[in-house]
């Protein structure tokens, strides 16, 4: 059964191009590890909605944008093998996903319902 990783984060607007380059490199590596689909996106319009909005969820500052991405894997085993390699393989060290302490990052693993 397919396995999905997803994330939501706040990234400084001044780092948009650097983040885009890092996302492209990460996508190449995810595909090399067996991913079926990789997508990363920068906000177009994210209205703040109190408790239930992307900007609120990631504690977005005025100078930040919201990014959303996901990776679809053929199965949990392939995804977990990639996750394990991320801690040991130096090729992942060159990709600065987020240079903060993770407080502005939400991520999770999902399986499709339909």
Image (spheres, helix red, strand yellow):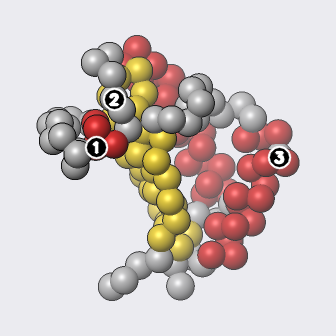
How crowded pointer 1 is (Cα within 10 Å; few <14, some 14-19, many 20+) is rated as: many
Q: Establish if 84 lies above or below 48.
A: below
- When asked about the image quadrant of residue 114, the answer is bottom left
- Residue at label 1? 54
Query: In front: 24, or 65?
Result: 65
Q: Position of residue 35 (x, y in %)?
A: 58, 64
Task: Identify the secondary structure beneath mark 3.
Answer: loop
**Which type of secondary structure does the marked residue at label 2 adopt?**
loop
> Which residue bears the numbered disc 3?
89
Please report the residue visible at 62 percent of the width from the left and 75 percent of the height from the top.
76
Residues under numbered marks 1 and 2 in contact, where contact means CB atoms less than 8 Å apart: yes
Q: Are the residues at dot 1 and dot 3 in contact (C-beta closer than 8 Å)?
A: no
The answer to whether residue 36 is visible is: no
Question: How dense is the environment of label 3, judged by Cα within 10 Å: few (below 14), some, or many (20 and up)?
Answer: few
Q: In this view, does 34 lie to the left or right of 67?
A: right
Give the mark nearer the N terminus: 1 vs 3.
1
Task: Quote the CA–CA distance across marks 1 and 3.
Answer: 32 Å
């Amino acid at each position: 059964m397919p396995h999905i990783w997803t994330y939501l984060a706040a990234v400084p607007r001044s780092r948009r191009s650097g983040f885009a380059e890092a996302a492209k490199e990460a996508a190449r590596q995810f595909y090399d590890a067996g991913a079926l689909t990789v997508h990363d996106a920068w906000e177009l319009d994210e209205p703040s909605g109190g408790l239930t909005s992307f900007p609120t969820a990631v504690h977005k500052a005025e100078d930040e944008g919201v990014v959303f991405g996901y990776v679809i894997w053929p199965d949990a085993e392939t995804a977990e093998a990639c996750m394990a390699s991320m801690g040991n393989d130096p090729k992942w060290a060159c990709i600065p996903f987020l240079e903060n302490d993770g407080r502005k990052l939400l991520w999770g693993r999902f399986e499709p319902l339909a």
